[in-house]
């Protein structure tokens, strides 16, 4: 069998072979050479070898000391301490602490860091060697080696005769051991130590130790290289992890800083420790005015709500979310509304170290909701007034027919009686009473429907000035009346008479509110612009240009609970007999009839302001003082008129009175009878006058049926309320006129006369 080469043997076996060979030679020459070797060579050499050995071992363990790896240092000492002459090895730190140590199993453990023990070892013949480890790490240490020698007496008697041969043999053995150890251990260990020092100094983990041997030192070098590869991989992974963490931290910081939600961190002492830009803008405080300060110190306006919430989160760890609170921003003194979410901030082991606060600014949403609620209130009020207007219009329309019948029959009776008849006076009183009642009905109708057929493009300033002149003549001198008007207010489409009525009504109410203590009535004419529906003070006002008339007084004011009722018909705060409750309802109807709006603002004890908005026109205004030419009393020329109305009394009255005016009238209360009459003789009627609202068949349907029987038949439809869709349908079917229903029989006669004369032209 082929034996392995000596160089390929393990280091331990090679050392054992060399030591065994030296032992055989030493046994032959020990006694003769002991004394001479001991005094001249053996002991000094042993000390020198121990020092050299200490230097080699120190070089080996330097890397472990620099890396503060006690385990590896102990392993090194255990491997190197197998020399039979070595009793103990120890690495002692500067403060006397033993970093690593080795004791031969057959010997008692000794503390090489203790000075007394060191003296005792020297006294018993041991060689105690100290070598300073040149470490570049944080530890400063010394290597201590305790080496045992054979007692001098034993050596001298055994080897005295062979002193020369022993000296020569030992010298040769030392040389062989030195060369072997240098090549097998010292040089590889020094290379390993040099590489370790370079890695430690330069932190270049790409360096490697070159080793081709298969012994323990070679294995140590390979393990050291593997360790460097592992460290290099971990260093690379650590750098990548640090780069990733740094990038993520930058991204998180950017998100935190630019978030559209106010974010801040509050510690257990309720101090601000972190805050983003949005939070600073929302709170109105600079960063330096918040960081490091408590909630009470930095934001006292939030302390009342935020402090109890943070204390509860810190105590329980449970989040508190969707908390709504408000504060006044110090920089703007404007109220702001917030919704806050508060969550506990925990460390890596789960301890609560603070509170994360996220605040949403809901000021715009809050104000939008308030504006919406106000608009909804205005809309409800508008719908309520519209419903009241419809009801009032229906009642007034029917009541007007009754009054017309009473007034007309009273007029017929007056004409039938002698002037000195006792009943004449009573009949005149009936007509006077019905006149007042008709005026009341007219005011109700003015509230319930617009007067579309009497509006003109006019300048309202002369109308306002005339109304003020009349007011000055009727109010006490303790009430001051003022006019504040733009130099050139815009013209409007309006009825001067109705606007005059509105101003007189509002002015009279204002003066009544100031009778007890006096005051000032101010009427202002200004141009106003509404840019959007959101800015509109009323849902009835669309974006555009308006003439605003403000009637302001310094009187007693209106209680808040009565503001929404002031425009209701028959509602009044005056005493019995002092008012009908129709004044403001009529004003409301007139303004709405002009496609405008009226708003009221009042505080008890400070006065009331009525704002009237009229759409401004672009054309040049007409003269408001211009009046229509006088008309002559209507007279008929025998024309045949078909009059249709569902009120039998009204048909009977109109028929009698118009016949006295010179007309040939056929009155009917059922539309079907009128259709039959025209069908029987289509050319016998010169004109048809019919009411619009009749049961069974409307005046519009009647007109359509009559025009099918006789195309081109002149038809006039009257109504208490003429809607735009009624006018459009009338035009589609061929009806010439849809007009407001006259209040008196004379007006009916005048209407028929005007239409008949127009047909002849």
Image (tube, rainbow, N blue to C red):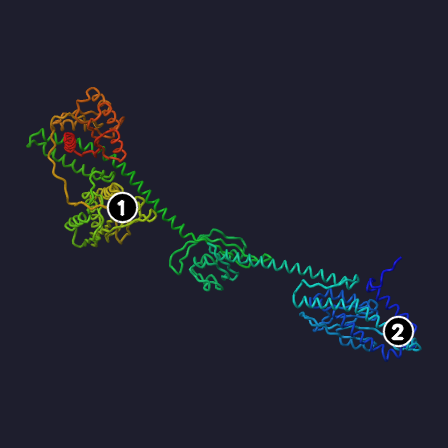
Dot 1 falls on a residue whose secondary structure is: strand
Q: Residues within 10 Å of mark 2 (few under 14, many from 20)?
A: some
Residue 169 numbered mark, or none? 2
Residue 316 versus residue 6: which sits nearer the camera?
6
Picture quarter with the N terminus: bottom right
Q: Residues within 10 Å of mark 1 (few under 14, many from 20)?
A: many
Disc 2 versus disc 1: nearer the observer = 2
Residue drawn at (78%, 66%), measured in percent from left and top? 78
- Residue 85 seen by the camera: yes
| Residue lying farthest to the right in this orientation | 161
Look at mark 1 in the image and give the residue it sits on.
598
Q: Where does residue 605 sit, x and y in percent of width and height?
A: 27, 53
Indicate left or right for 671 with 290 as reference: left
Residue drawn at (28%, 34%), measured in percent from left and top? 725
Q: Where does residue 611 sit, x and y in percent of width and height?
A: 26, 49
Residue 343 numbered mark, or none? none
Above or below 522: residue 643? above
Q: Where does residue 174 sit, x and y in percent of width and height?
A: 84, 72
Residue 476 versus residue 672: which sits nearer the camera?
672
- Mark 2–mark 1 distance (CA, rounded to whole Å): 133 Å
């Amino acid at each position: 069998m082929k034996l392995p080469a000596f160089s390929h043997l393990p280091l331990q076996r090679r050392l054992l072979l060399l030591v065994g060979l030296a032992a055989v030679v030493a046994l032959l020459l020990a006694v003769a050479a002991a004394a001479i070797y001991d005094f001249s060579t053996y002991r000094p050499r042993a000390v020198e070898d121990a020092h050299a050995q200490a230097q080699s071992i120190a070089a080996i363990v330097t890397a472990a000391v620099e890396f503060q790896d006690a385990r590896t240092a102990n392993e090194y000492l255990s491997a190197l301490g197998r020399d039979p002459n070595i009793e103990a090895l120890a690495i002692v730190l500067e403060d006397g602490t033993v970093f690593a140590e080795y004791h031969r199993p057959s010997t008692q453990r000794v503390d090489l860091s203790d000075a007394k023990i060191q003296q005792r070892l020297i006294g018993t013949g041991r060689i105690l060697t100290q070598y300073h480890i040149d470490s570049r790490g944080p530890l400063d240490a010394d290597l201590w080696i305790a080496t045992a020698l054979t007692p001098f007496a034993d050596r001298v008697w055994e080897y005295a005769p062979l002193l020369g041969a022993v000296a020569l043999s030992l010298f040769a053995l030392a040389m062989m051991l030195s060369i072997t150890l240098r090549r097998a251990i010292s040089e590889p260990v020094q290379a390993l130590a040099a590489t370790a020092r370079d890695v430690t100094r330069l932190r270049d983990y790409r360096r490697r130790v070159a080793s081709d041997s298969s012994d323990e030192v070679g294995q140590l070098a390979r393990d050291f290289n593997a360790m460097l590869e592992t460290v290099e991989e971990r260093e690379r992974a650590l750098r990548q992890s640090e780069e990733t963490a740094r990038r993520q931290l930058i991204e998180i910081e950017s998100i935190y800083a630019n978030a559209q939600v106010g974010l801040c961190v509050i510690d257990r002492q309720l101090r601000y420790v972190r805050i983003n830009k949005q939070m600073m803008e929302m709170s109105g405080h600079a960063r330096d005015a918040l960081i490091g300060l408590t909630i009470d110190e930095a934001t006292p306006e939030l302390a009342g709500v935020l402090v109890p919430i943070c204390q509860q989160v810190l105590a329980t760890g449970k989040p508190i979310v969707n908390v709504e609170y408000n504060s006044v921003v110090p920089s703007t003194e404007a109220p702001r509304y917030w919704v806050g979410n508060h969550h506990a901030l925990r460390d890596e082991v789960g301890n609560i170290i603070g509170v994360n606060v996220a605040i949403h600014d809901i000021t715009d949403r809050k104000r939008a909701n308030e504006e919406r609620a106000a608009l909804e209130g205005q809309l409800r009020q508008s719908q309520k007034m519209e419903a009241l207007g419809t009801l009032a219009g229906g009642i007034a329309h029917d009541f007007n027919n009754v009054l017309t019948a009473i007034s007309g029959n009273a007029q017929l009776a007056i004409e039938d009686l002698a002037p000195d008849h006792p009943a004449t006076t009573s009949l005149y009183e009936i007509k006077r009473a019905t006149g007042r009642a008709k005026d009341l009905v007219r005011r109700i109708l003015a509230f319930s429907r617009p007067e579309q057929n009497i509006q003109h493009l006019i300048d309202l300033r002369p109308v306002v000035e005339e109304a003020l002149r009349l007011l000055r003549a009727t109010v006490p001198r303790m009430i001051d009346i003022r006019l504040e008007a733009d130099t050139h207010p815009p013209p409007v489409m309006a009825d001067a008479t109705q606007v005059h009525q509105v101003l007189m009504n509002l002015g009279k109410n204002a003066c009544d509110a100031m009778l007890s203590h006096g005051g000032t009535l101010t009427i202002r004419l200004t141009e106003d612009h509404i840019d959007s529906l959101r800015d509109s003070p009323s849902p009835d006002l669309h974006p555009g240009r308006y003439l605003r008339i403000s009637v302001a007084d310094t009187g007693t004011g209106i209680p808040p609970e009565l503001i929404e009722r002031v425009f209701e018909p028959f509602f009044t705060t005056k005493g019995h007999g002092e008012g009908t409750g129709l004044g403001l309802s009529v004003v409301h109807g007139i303004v709405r009839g002009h496609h405008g709006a009226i708003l009221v603002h009042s505080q008890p004890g400070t006065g009331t302001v009525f704002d009237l908005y009229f759409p401004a026109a672009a054309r040049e205004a007409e003269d408001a003082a211009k009046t229509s030419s006088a008309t002559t009393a209507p007279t008929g020329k025998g024309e045949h008129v078909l009059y249709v109305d569902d009120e039998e009394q009204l048909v009977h009255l109109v028929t009698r009175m118009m016949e006295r005016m010179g007309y040939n009238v056929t009155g009917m209360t059922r539309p079907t009878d009128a259709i039959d009459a025209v069908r029987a003789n289509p050319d016998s009627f010169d004109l048809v006058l019919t009411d619009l609202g009749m049961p069974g068949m409307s005046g519009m349907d009647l007109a359509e049926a009559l025009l099918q029987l006789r195309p081109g038949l002149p038809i006039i439809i009257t109504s208490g309320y003429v809607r735009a869709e009624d006018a459009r349908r009338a035009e589609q079917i061929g009806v010439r006129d849809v007009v407001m229903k006259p209040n008196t029989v004379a007006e009916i006669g005048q209407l028929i006369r005007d239409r008949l004369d127009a047909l002849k032209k």
